[in-house]
Image (tube, rainbow, N blue to C red):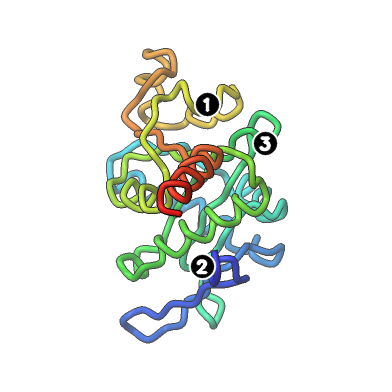
Amino acid sequence: MGILLAYEISIKNDEHERIIVRPAVAADVVFAKEIAGEMEASAIARGTGIAKRSPESICEKILAGKAVIAVTDYGKWVGFQYLEAWEEGKFVSNSGLIVSPKYRNAGVATAIKIKIFYLSRSKYPNACIFSITTGLAIMKLNTSLGFEPVTYSEITKDEHFWEGCKSCVNYDVLNGKKKCNCLCTAMLFDPAKVKKEKKEFQLLYN
């Protein structure tokens, strides 16, 4: 995993601003209201469904050490994502990816996704990591990290996870289909499967 396990990832945008992508710390709760507001505004602008997150829930993830944040080196918020464990750590979700409009298309989302993925692997090395999304770019990035499209039956059955979808505009679709599918695509990273494939590859070429 090399440099991706480092505390932070630094990138620069076209304006030569240094953007730091790192695990969120307690001091970052000051950005919670701005993050929650941008999540809602972005969903409305795209006309897609997304479960609403309150500033309080954002604070909770930050204080629990379950979030990644991107900020400029002068302290301006740039992007955010969080993780959550389900079924006693059997599954981990990577959710709530958001980037401030000014900083989109600069590689920030990619850096955040990579960082949250390895934070999830570090905290829950044996867990299956899943993501549900309507975004093609996120699907492509998930694929590059080893995720595969799956049916909803292969991700968590925890009702608390699905309760988070109640504020999504597509919740009636999800509920009407008894949580078997919706407009989002489910993607899963299974460490056991990856380990098995790696072992088979080594046996084949050694």
Secondary structure of the residue carrying tag 2 is strand
Residue 125 picture location, percent across and down: 64, 47
Q: Is mark 1 on a helix, strand or loop?
A: helix
Between marks 1 and 3 in the image, the one whose residue lies nearer the viewer? 3
Q: Residue at x 36, y 47 (%)?
A: 143
- The 10 Å Cα crowd at callout 1, few under 14, some 14 to 19, many 20 or more, is some
Among numbered discs 1 and 3, the one appearing first in the sequence:
3
Tell me which numbered mark, 2 or 1, is placed earlier along the sequence.
Answer: 2
How far separated are the C-alphas under marks 2 and 1?
27 Å
Of all residues, the one furthest to the front in this rendering is 206
Q: In which quarter of the image is the N terminus?
A: bottom right
Question: What amino acid is at disc 3?
Answer: Gly
Residue 144: x and y, percent? 37, 53
Question: In x, y percent, where is residue 163?
Answer: 55, 26
In the displayed structure, 11 sits above or below 155; it is below
- Above or below for 106 versus 197: below
Mark carried by residue 162: 1
Dots 3, 2 in contact, CB < 8 A: no
Residue 174 in the figure: left or right of residue 66: left
User: The residue tagged with tag 3: helix, strand or loop?
Assistant: loop
Amino acid type indicated by mark 1:
Trp
The residue wearing badge 3 is 89
Q: Residue at x 35, y 33 (%)?
A: 184
Crowdedness of circle 3 by 10 Å Cα count: few (<14), some, many (20+)? some
Residue appearing at x 39%, y 30% in the figure = 150
Q: Do the residues labelled 1 and 3 touch (CB within 8 Å)?
A: no
In the rendered image, which residue does mark 2 sit on?
A: 70
What amino acid type should be assigned to the residue bearing mark 2?
A: Ala
> Is 34 or 67 nearer to us in this picture?
67
